[in-house]
Image (tube, rainbow, N blue to C red):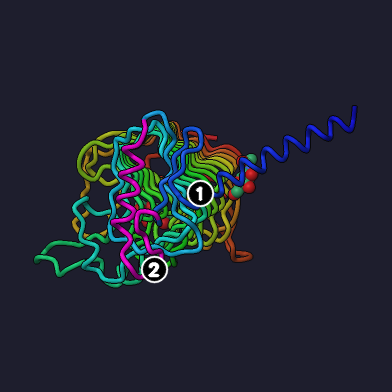
Amino acid sequence: MISSLIGRMVQFITLVLVLLTASAVNAATSRISLASTVIFDVMRYGAKGNGKTDDSQAFMKAWTAACQSKPNAKSIVNIPGGRTYLLKPVAFTGPCKPSKMFVQVSGNIVGSPRKGDWMSNHADSWLQFSNVNGLTVNGKGRIDGLGPMWWKNPCISPPPPGVTCHAPVEVQFKRCHGMRLNGLTLVNSPRVHLLLTTCNGAIVSNIHIISPETSPNTDGINIAGSTNVNVRDSVIAAGDDCIAISGGSSNIKISGIMCGPGHGISIGSLGHGGTDIVENVDVRNCTMRKTLAGVRIKTYQGGVGYAKKISFTGIKFDAVYNPIIIDQYYCPTKQDCLSSATTVKLSDITFRGISGTSNMENVINLSCSKTVACTNIVVDRVYIKSAIPGRKVYGSCINAHGRATHVKPYLNCLKP
Ligand SMILES: *[C@@H]1O[C@H](CO)[C@@H](O)[C@H](O)[C@H]1NC(C)=O
Ligand SMILES: *[C@@H]1O[C@H](CO)[C@@H](O)[C@H](O)[C@H]1NC(C)=O
């Protein structure tokens, strides 16, 4: 009985080994058909992966072949590990025939060290995925946008007088549906590391973003005009906002983020021309270390629209400069700052279960518009003390309405 069982197990294991060997042999020829999975290996499409030769064309060819392959197959664009691929700006566009597209990034990707190579016809992002449904980008690869050459000068060529240059975004997903991004490391972006625009249903997880504190405009993740987005379990060190959520975004969940250095997690800035609406944002279980801001909502004077149902819960601060901020007077240039009767209306904003230390004395600053009040602001179980022993901290408000319960420092501007 037992020996025949063992015999069958041996048979079964042998069969599995034979299948595995067969697939390994097939993998060597790189475009394999295993059931309905088809692999498109960039090496087979001519990539060199030596970090010096331009591999953009090979990547485009592998992508195009994968995107145009069988509708009911699973297409995998494979970027093998142990190599570095040099890319100019590349647009990976859909729609694609397969219902699911995978990009396996095991190797590293680096930008061209020649700025002239960064001219692109797809606006201002370096690696752009657009119009692809059911796209998964996964792997332990490292994406390097050669930030230092952009931080000194964001222009590709000298701009006409009066024109401000914006360095490229490192990775952008545009008009995506059901996107998954997992595991990658994004370093030294020229500007924003990861930008999601007009995406619906996206999960970003286990991402590592690394740029120095002094690098200008290097937001970690920007979410704009997108719905049903979940960003979780990621570590972000950047020179600007770790995560910024801007107009047209709703049902956004952020959790398990380690942020610092950086400017914290931010809604906005909103109301800078046009109507901005942000709704249902849930930020929880995040830690900020030595960030310039902690959690904040920033709007310009004179904007139109609203932001509501926004909650920050379970946040820990370690020596953060400005832990909790509502700033409806946002004006980064500090010049010609409007004072206006209109603004983006803020309501149903919750700060709950927040604790830690601050390097500044003003630890809660709820500065709402003088003409349009913030309503239903809830501050509950928030305890922030100074990172400097013995120093006092305080909170302040302008036109903020709602409740403060179990809050230290005491906020006398909200009802208990
Ligand atoms: C909170 O986030 C940390 C990572 O920052 C993670 O390890 C932990 O599991 C999370 N806890 C919950 C309850 O989600
Ligand atoms: C609170 O924020 C407002 C708006 O940015 C600013 O003008 C004010 O100086 C801040 N208050 C303190 C005490 O820092």
| Snapshot quadrant of residue 174 | top left
Q: Which residues are magenta?
A: 44-70
Is residue 263 depicted above or below 397 in this figure? below
Q: Amino acid at mark 1?
A: Ala
Say what secondary structure mark 1 lies in.
helix
Residue at left offset 25%, top offset 66%: 154
Q: Which residue is mark 1?
A: 27
Asked if residue 246 shows in the view, the reply is no
Q: Is residue 87 visible?
A: yes
- Looking at the rendered structure, the secondary structure element under dot 2 is strand
Query: 244 and 150: which one is in front?
Result: 150
* Viewer-side residue, 390 vs 305: 305
Label 2 to label 1: alpha-carbon separation:
23 Å
Q: Is mark 2 within 8 Å of ligand 1?
A: no
**Residue 371 percent across, percent down from the top left:** 28, 38
Disc with the residue nearer the chain's start (2 vs 1): 1
Viewer-side label of 2, 1: 1
Q: Which is more toward the observer, 264 or 52? A: 52
On the rendered structure, is 401 left or right of 16? Answer: left
Q: Amino acid at mark 2?
A: Gly
- Quarter of the image that includes the N terminus: top right
- Image coordinates of residue 248 in percent, x first then y, are 31, 35
Rendered view: 250 above or below 236: above
> Which of 43 and 284 lies nearest the eye of the viewer?
43
- Residue 207 lies, in percent from the top left, at 50, 51
Residue 51, disc: 2
